[in-house]
Image (spheres, helix red, strand yellow):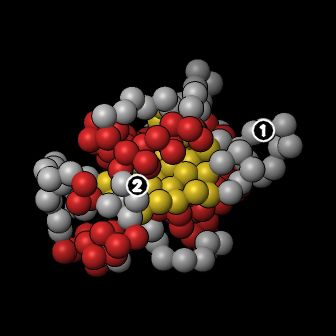
Amino acid sequence: MDENLKQPLFIDFEASSLNADSYPIEVAWSLEDGTIESHLINPYAIDSWTDWDPMAQTIHGLSRNTLSNEGKHLKWVAQRMNEVLADKVLLTNAYEFDLDWCETLFKAADEKMHFTFGDAWQVFGQHLGVCSSIEKRVSRQNLYHELTKVSEQAWKQVTGEQHRASVDVQQLIEMWGIVTK
């Protein structure tokens, strides 16, 4: 890896479902020193957060009971995110979903986000040298194919269950390591 190239920060959310009225139940992000901070979110502080998909639960493995017992209040989570992530850009591989869940969290917590999101795959693609440029035009399909291979390679380097926020963030860190070799 290029020593002058600073590792970006990554973020991932898990949610109650993929429905329009879904809400965040877990968030994790990486820090400059490479550590990952992760928090379960207790959805019971907000009466309107009732959406729940049992299929989503089988994927992320988080039950409502676990979230009730171990999850933190959403206002605390939003304030902690602002405290640690202020003025930073966090990359995600599910930009639209993660941004929506983050905005849902902050709106319910009556807090304003002091950080922004970026698209991890776009940044990875730029470092792979396969993004479109004046000299080189590569299709989005080829970019997706190359990044899928990098993603699969990165998953081989990660321990833990996929679809848990901290594990998914670790996978993004591994992808960064691969594309910047």
Coordinates of residue 67 in the picture (x, y in percent):
33, 69
| Percent x, y of residue 46 | 21, 51
User: Which label lies toward us, 2 or 1?
Assistant: 2
Q: Nearer the viewer, residue 179 or 38?
A: 38
Residue that mark 2 sits on? 13
Amino acid residing under circle 2: Phe
The residue beneath circle 1 is 5
Residue located 26% across and 58% down the image: 43
Classify mark 1: residues with Cα within 10 Å, few (<14), some (14-19) or many (20+).
Answer: few
Residue 176 in the image: above or below residue 110:
below
Instruction: Choose between 15 and 153: the one closer to the eye.
Output: 15
Q: Is residue 22 rendered to the left or right of residue 11?
A: left
- Element at label 1: loop
Please count the marks in the image.
Answer: 2
Q: Residue 63 carries which label?
A: none
State the image coordinates of residue 140 (x, y, percent, origin top left): 43, 41
Residue 125, horizontal then vertical, whole percent: 57, 42
Taking the image as shown, residue 19 lies to the left or right of residue 156, namely: left
The amino acid at mark 1 is Leu
Q: Distance between the residues labelled 2 and 1?
A: 26 Å
Sequence-earlier tag: 2 or 1: 1
Picture quadrant of residue 8: top right
Q: Describe the element under mark 2 as helix, strand or loop.
A: strand
Mark 2 crowdedness (10 Å alpha carbons): few <14, some 14-19, many ≥20: many
Q: In front: 152, or 34?
A: 34
Seen at 66% across and 48% down, the residue is: 31
Residue 137 visible from this viewpoint: no
Q: Is residue 67 visible?
A: yes
Q: Quadrant of residue 174?
A: bottom right
Q: Looking at the image, which residue is at 17% across and 68% down?
A: 53
